[in-house]
């Protein structure tokens, strides 16, 4: 098991919802920003949503309006709630944590596949 582990991916029908989770082992999210990226086949990786160490959230174009990023400090986990999914949301979703003061301290999970289809 790696330092950053994603879970919750799978297959869902259009219009459905999925909640992804990101667990960071040994790294407190109080000092790490959490970023969710996604990469569809044949496309570049893009930022979907982020939550800073102080709790501020930001959404990329792909995540704005339908996705919600949150975190549970007790569990040291972050989540990405995705609603009203569309086939174009099909991608591998990656969790990245980056230290709030030392940007080189950046860690990636292996990704979790989300497939939106009938």
Image (tube, rainbow, N blue to C red):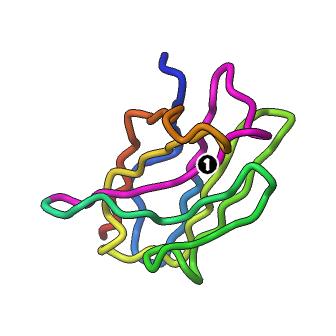
Which residue is nearer to you in this view: 32 or 91?
32
Can you name the residue that lies furthest to the left here?
Answer: 42
Counting from the top left corner in percent of width and height, residue 36 is at 50, 54
| Residue 9 relative to residue 29: left or right | left
Instruction: Give the x, y percent position of residue 2.
Output: 48, 20
User: From this viewpoint, which residue is outermost toward the front?
Assistant: 102
The structure residue drawn at horizontal position 39% and vertical position 40%, both measured from the top left corner, is: 111
Taking the spot 86% from the left edge, 34% from the top edge, the residue there is 74
Q: Under tag 1, what secondary structure?
A: strand
* Residue labelled with disc 1: 34
Q: Position of residue 90 (x, y in %)?
A: 32, 63
Tell me where the magenta segment starts and ends, as one range. Answer: 20-41
How many numbered marks does the figure carry? Answer: 1
Q: In the orientation shown, which residue stands out farthest toward the bottom? A: 65
Query: Magenta segment: does it hold 34?
Result: yes
Front one among 12 and 111: 111
């Amino acid at each position: 098991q790696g330092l950053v582990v994603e879970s919750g991916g799978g297959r869902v029908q259009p219009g459905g919802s999925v909640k992804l989770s990101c667990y960071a082992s040994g790294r407190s999210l109080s000092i790490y920003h959490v970023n969710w990226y996604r990469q569809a086949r044949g496309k570049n990786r893009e930022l979907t949503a982020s939550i800073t160490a102080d709790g501020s959230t930001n959404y990329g174009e792909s995540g704005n309006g339908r996705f919600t990023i949150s975190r549970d400090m007790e569990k040291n986990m972050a989540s990405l709630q995705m609603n009203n999914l569309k086939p174009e949301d099909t991608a591998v979703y990656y969790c990245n944590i980056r230290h709030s003061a030392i940007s080189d301290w950046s860690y990636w999970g292996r990704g979790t596949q989300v497939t939106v289809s009938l």
